[in-house]
Each structure stands twice: as structure tokens, then as C-alpha cells.
Image (tube, rainbow, N blue to C red):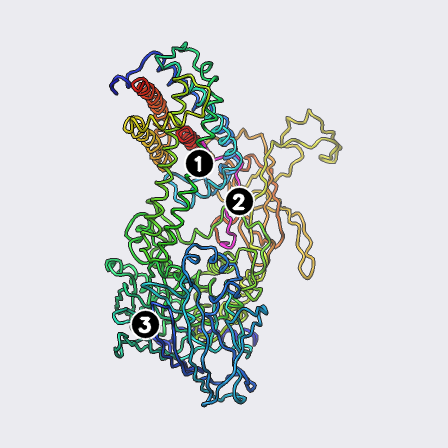
Amino acid sequence: MAIVELLKPVRGTFRVVGARWLLYMLAMLPGMLSLSKHLDEAVGKRPWFHDLQPPLDTLSTRFVLAQLGDGVALLLAGVGILWLLQLVWLGGSARVLNPRTPGVYTKVFKNGWQYLARFLRIAIIAVIVTAVLQFAISKLFGALSARAETHAWPFYTSYITLNMWRAATIFVALTLVGVIAFWMRMIAVDEGRFDTRRLPWQALKLVRRRPFAALLGQFLIVCAVLGIQAVALLCWRQSPDGEVWLGAWVLLQLVTAYVWQFRIRTALAILQQAR
Amino acid sequence: MNILDERRLISFALMLVLAVAAPVHAQIPESSVRYSIEVQLDPETRDVIGKETIEWTNTLADPVTSLPMHLYLNAFSNEASTWFRDARGAGLLQSRAMKSFPDPWGWTEPTSILQGGTQLSWQPIAPDDGNHLDRSLIEVELAEPLEPGATVTLEISWDGRLPAVAERTGGHTDFFFVAQWFPKIAGVTPEGKFNRRQFHGLTEFYADFADYEVRIGVPEGWTIAAAGEGELADSGDGIDWYEYRQRGIVDFAFSIGSNMQSFTSTHELATGGEVEIQIFQPKGFEHQVERWVTATAASLDVMSTRVMPYPYDTVTVVLPPMAGLRAMGMEYPTIFTGGPGGRIWDDSPAATTRINESVIAHEFAHQYFMGLLATNEFEDAFMDEGMTEYWGGEIMEDTWGEEAGNGYLFGRPFNANSTTILTKPAQRRYPAVWSGPSFLARGYSTGRQVYKRPQTTLQTAAKLFGQDTVDAIFKAYAAEWAFRHPRVEDFWAVAEEVAGEDVAAMLRESFLQPEIPDFKVVDLTTKKYQPPRGYTVVDDEQVYVGPERDIDEWFGLHAESREAEGNVMLEVLDPGYTREQRVMGRIKRRLVTPQKSEPDADYSSDGVTLYESRARVEGPGWDTLPVTVRLRFADGVVVDDAWDAKSIYREYRFLREAPIESVLIDPEYKIRLDVAPLNNGLSREPQGEVPKSWSRWMMGLYQAIAEGAAAWL
């Protein structure tokens, strides 16, 4: 199926996208309100901060971050809940958007719950693989750092270039594991499998057969989404036009939800072609 | 004028004359020690083998039968040395680089010590900790006692090796920074005793001023930088021999590299005379040299103008490459290491900062604090690091202004001095700065006590008593104590002579108090005033006050509360304090004439409603840190209260038509010693955009984290 076709909305698209967007907005609300109240006390009442205006210098940023306090815990809890809910929503959406498993498109959540246990098992596999990869990366770059010192590499190479490569390698490893986990979930929904043991091999087989579409394409989409969000966050933080960036961010979340839906449909289309 | 005042005046005048009439290049006095050294460094083996002739004159009051001598390279000889047992060495032992070298260790041993042809005996001593595995200090038995004023000549040969992991000294492959490398006689303290100290991880060095003539052999084609003035003397057998000499310095260090380049320029001091600036850095970065020369020249000028003219003819800045990275940021007389050399300073974000300039400023300031005013860093580390930290900041401010003290990071000013500010007050009770020896100061923030606390003490003194006063103290201190070994009492004495008892008392207290001070506003409340219930006497008549009186808002109040003449009734509760004697506290009420500022936008008065406002401020309870407490009301009225801050808290109560809006201690932030000024103020209602904008942005940040978690797991 052509990419252009997959970009067009289908039945269920707006419900899937809209609800995911809403999910992201609502899940963070308690944490945000709690943080706002805490910051009113810890920051708003301290004259030191009264005249601070963006863009903030590093010192002020450090000071504000140090005052965040308990609100952060609630926001982190929000992240956890949101992650769980989006797993449910992923399963439901994949079923609703899959022509092979036509669900009632108004019952995305109901459809999604049945996949949660499987998806969590997949997450555990992803965590284990990530930990192994992190260990290997840490060993590799530790050895390179030592070599840099014993073989008198230039300072820039030893500290800047090497650390940039380390960060990039970690990001790529994380994202690749994430892409494989995504495929495992899509296959689980597409084939209705309860057993997760064979899923990693099926996912790896798929990305071996379709490296560009199944691996590179998905990898680039994830990189683009996270990269754009990171840049937007930085601009938002340092811009004096906070309200404008708040609006832009909300819109970006909507676009992100649409891209997420596009990923699912692309994946389903690839699975269909692979059969 | 009594005789004491006359003496002080004469002394002050004398100091001023000394300071003003100081020569453009301060004279270097005669030294009691002379070193003539010949040394050869083999980069392949890291061997540093040499011989030296030491002429040492007994300046002690008694005959000397033995001489303590530093063998500081032995600090790196095994993992049980005193240096390694200290925190600094423990960290190094964990490093991969240390484990990666087959033999990273450094060591030194004399092969012969002769006095007039007689072989002398020696043995290691460990007076600081009794560590029998530490050989960083030895005692050499003289052939015969040396009378006071007499001179002994020792001829010493030694073998040695530099450590590969260049913590302070050492290197490998293509670069070496060579410090603490030759057998050196321990310095004599102002109390007339030898400074028998081993090499410690937490503190640095102490030695007598000496004259050095050093002949250094390095592989042909390698470049060199060293203390003092020197040149290539001769070459042969693949070795280039350089000869350096310098009078009146407390140590001699040098650096060599196969991929290093030297750049020399002459700087005319602001106080007159010339100094040769040498930059020694990796090849290929000639375009950066101007930055480092500018920073060094600025440091020379600021210190020469405000403290004492730089007395030497040369200063060398070494920017080490990777092989010597752990030696960066270290000071030796007329030569010091800055930050890392190379591309880092070309690329963002480091390129826009002045971090390396501030390292250069700091290390240059060390030329004065321990270089010229040779305090004992084993025992009074804060005397050199703290004063250096202060003057490093002054150099940055004088040269580049306060706002851009450290350049720019991500497009915003990165202020050098504001980095002393903490987000939270110091929670723990710290030992006093003036406890010693400094190398025993473990288990607390040495950096804060040794570097930042003395720096902020001097900044506070400048804010309270004027920058000129502090500068005058340092000029007099340098004039009196350069090329000598002052103690902190000597600094206080000079401060008292020059600036008076108040300044000296403030400095003394700031160094002696165990805790880092923290002023804070802990409470601020306001409520509508209500006539007090019960029986009261009004116009000689007993009146019952019940709820029906609530509408009579002014009942029971002093007439002053009406502020008919614009004066505000200030009620202060001060609990008093106890020193050698008790000073009882009391509640004082007095009328003050306030300042006026813009009223709050949403403030209005009905002319009837009154507010009872209360505030509580707390402080460290010191004798010498007076502050202003600024109380601001919704109607724009501002009351400043001068608090001597000798008690540990103070409470305020007001009855006014306008509620209190905010309290701010030390509004001009004079007390820089209070490194946590965030809690110095409190307002009744949240203000500013920060809480809203940050909570929204944090929501976005966490959504992005959730998106990442969804993508990765």
C-alpha cells in the first residue's frame, strides 16, 4: 500500500488519534496541578525568582529544578500510568485499524485490555535486552576511554567525540529494541498470539526480510518524533513566548498521535504483505 | 587622639607609602637555599634521573643535626602511600587508565647523598600518620651539626620515574608535566621549625624560597617549558640540554612534549616593566593563543595593580594534551597548567565560555597566594586556595565585567561569581575554616570551606566595608609578607592595622565560626485586625468588647496606627543573645519614616479595614554580619530595619491599613557568605511567571518522557 494511502485517515483514525491525544493531556493533569501548587510555594513566594524571564540562564534553571520537589513524583507516576494506558490503547487501536481483525471501532479500550499482559511480557523482554546492550556499550566505551588516555588520543576525541558516540549508540540501541518490541506487539495483535516466546524471532525474521520498511522506516519515524519533541521542548523553555509554545506543544502532541496511528497502519500493511 | 590611634595612623601611613611606592618589579630578596640540578627525562621509560647540589643555610635558632627532605614522587609508588590513602588517590586507583598501564607507578630514591665527600645516611619518616609504606619524606643525618647561620652543601644523585597517570605530575607517550620531582629540603615554618609533612592527597605544598639553576635533558626535537628563564644550551647524542634559572621561588616545575608548541610574547605591565608570557600547548591551535595571552596579561595587570607588581620576568601557561590531562589546573611558581589544550575551545558550547580564562586567572592568582605569600597549604589550605579563588573572580570581573564573568553558555551569561550560590543552605555543621592541618579535613565539603568560603568572606568584606578597604588590606599584606610565610593571624593583624578593628573582627569571625551562615525568612502572615475581646478601659471607663465591636475596626489601637503623619509603627521582638555576657532581649516599638514605592495593582483601601501582619526572620547569630530587613506592604510602603543580627531571630508585627506583601533580608546581597540567598525573601502571595510556566513545561517534558518510554519499551 502506498505511503500516501496510509497517511489518509480511515474509519477509526480520528477516534484513535483524538483519544490518545486526550490521554496524554489528562494523564499529566494531576501532576501538573500538584507541581504548580508546589512551585507557587517554593518559587512563587521567593522574591529571588520573581523577575526571572525566559530564556533562563543555566544557574536559574538549576535553581528552579532544585525546587521542583514532590510534584515530580506525581508527574513520574503520571508517566507510568500513561505508559500502561498507551499499551492498552496500542493493542485496541491495532485491532480496530487492522482490516483482518475488525473490531467495533468505538470499543478500542475494551479491545486493548486483552493484550495488556502480553504487551507487559514483551516490555520485560525489552528491558532485559536493553540492560544487556547497555552493559555491552558501557564495557566497550569504558575500554575506549581507557585506550584514549593510555594512547594519548586528543582531548576532544577522548571526551567530546567519544561521549557523543556513546550517547548516540545508547539512543540507537534503545530505539532498535523499541522497534523490535513494537513489531512483537503488532504480530501478537495481527496473529492473535498469546504466547510471547516465539514473537522475538518472528519480529527479527520480519526485519531481516524487510529491513528498510520494517526496521529503518520505523526507526526513522521514532527518531523524528523524539527529535522534534526535544527541540520543541528546548525552544519552549527558552522562549519568552511561553503561551505560543504551549499551543504549539499541544498541537505537536496531536500530530504525534497521528504519526503513531500511521506507524500502526504501516506495520499492519507490512504484515499483510509479508504473509 | 590617643597613642594607640596615633600608632595605627602611622602604621597605616607606612603601609600606604609601602604600597604606593612599591617598585614596578618588586625586588626578589636573597634566598637561604640554592639548587643546582641536572636531570634527564626518558619518555620511553618515564625515568627521571638526576643529580643536584643544594646549598642550605640554617635559619633556625638552634643547630641542625638532620634535614627532612621530600621525595614526593614516592607518593605515586604504591597504593598504600599516604597520598593514595587519601580520598584523591582512592579515586585514581579506580580509574581504568590506571589499570590499563602495565606499570603506572612513579617513585624516586637517592643513590647517594654526600656532605663534603662524606656519604650521609637517611631513612623514611612518617610524622603525619606513621604510615611505614609511605616514603614521601626522609630524614638525612648530617655529618656534623650545622650551627645557626652556617651553610651546608649537599650533593645528591637519584633515580626516579614519573607516574604514567599524570595526577599533578607525570605523563606518558608524548607529554609530561614534571613537578615534585627532585629531592627537596623541607621548608622552615614561621615558628622556626621544619615543616615535616608527607605528600597528602587533600593539600599541596610548602617550601622555602630558593634560587634554582636547572639543566634539563630531553629527547632531541621535543619542546620544553619551565619555571623561570632558559634556553637551549647544547645538544648531543640525541639529547637537547636546556638551562633554566630563577631566583626566589618555592618550587621548580617543567613540562615537555613531542607535539607541543611554544608561543612567547612580551607584556608591558600596567605598573611598569615587562613580563614574558609563554603559552605551551598542543600544535595546530595557534589561533587560540591570543585568548590565553589576553587572559594571562589581564591577570598580570589586575594582580600587579591591586595587590603587588609581579616580581618575576616570565610566566608560562601550559595547556596539557590528553596524556597530561590530570595535571591541569595546577600552580607552580612562574609556570602553571590551565584547562585542556586543543579543539575543545573552538567548538560550541565551550567556545563561547571563558572557562579556560577563569582557570588561567585562578592559577595565575596562585602566583601570589602561595607563590609570593607562601602560606603553608598543609595547615592553612584556605589561605592560598580561598584568597586565590577570590582574586581569580576579581580578575574575571575587572577584565570582562560581572555579567559576562565566565562568558556565555547557550546564549546566556554564565556568571563566574554567581556559581558560588547554592540552591540549598549548607545542611551540615562544618568544621571551622581555621582548623588544621588541612589534610585532615575529611568527610565534609573541603571545596566549599577551602575555596568558596574564604572567597565569599572577602566578597562580603568588600560589600560591607568597601572594595578600596579590601584592596588596601591586600596591598599592605603583600608589601609586608611577600617572600615570607604568613599565617592567618598575620593577615588579620594587617587587616586591623589598615582597616580597623571592625573589619578584622568580621574577617576573624568569618574564618572561625564553624557554620556557613544562612539568613532566611521563615514566616510571613497577615490577617484582618479585630478588636480584642474582653474588658478594657477606654477614657477611664471599663468597656466590654464583644462581637458587636467587630465593626469598630480601630477600637483598642494606638493612635499611631492611623499613620496621620505618614510614619509607620514598627514593633520588633529581638530575643537577645549570649556571648561572654548575656544581652537580654526585648520588644521595641518605634515610629519609622518609610519609603514609598508603587502600590500593588490590585490594592485598594476602604479606610477602615486594618491588617495585623507578622514576619519572622532568622540568621546565624554572628557578631559582625549586620543586615537590612526590607518589609514591603501592598500600598507600596517600604520599611527598612537595620538588624545587627547578633540574635538568631527577629520578629516583626504591624497594624496597618495595608497587608504586608513581602520580606527581604539583605536586599543588596551584601552578605555573599550566605551562599543560599534563595530563602532570604518571602512574599505572601506567589508572584512572577516562573511557577506557571515551569509547571506547564514540566508537563510537556514528562509527556516527552512518556513518548520515549512508549517508543523504547
Horizontal and vertical percent position of residue B6? 53, 75
Q: Quadrant of the C terminus of chain B?
A: top left
Q: Residue visible at 43% across and 14% down?
A: A108
- Judging from the image, what secondary structure is the residue with disc 2 in? helix
- Mark 3 vs mark 1: give the one in front: 3
Q: Which residue is mark 1?
A: B690
Tell me the kind of residue under disc 1. Answer: Val
Kind of residue at badge 2? Asn
Question: Is residue B685 magenta-colored?
Answer: yes
**First reached walking from the N terminus: tag 1 or tag 2:** 2
Range of magenta residues: B671-695
Q: Which kind of residue does numbered mark 3 sit on?
A: Thr
Classify B450 as above or below B61: above
Q: Quadrant of residue A263?
A: top left
Q: Which residue does the image show at 46% across and 58% down from the upper left?
A: B92
Foreground pick, B183 / B653: B183
Q: Which mark is residue B314?
A: 3
Residue at the disc numbered 2: B679
Q: Residues within 10 Å of mark 3 (few under 14, many from 20)?
A: many
Position of residue A191 measured from the top left corner of the image (x, y, whole percent): 40, 17
- In this view, the residue in front, B313 or A137, is A137
Is residue A152 depicted above or below B178 in this figure?
A: above
Q: Which is more toward the observer, B488 or B71?
A: B71
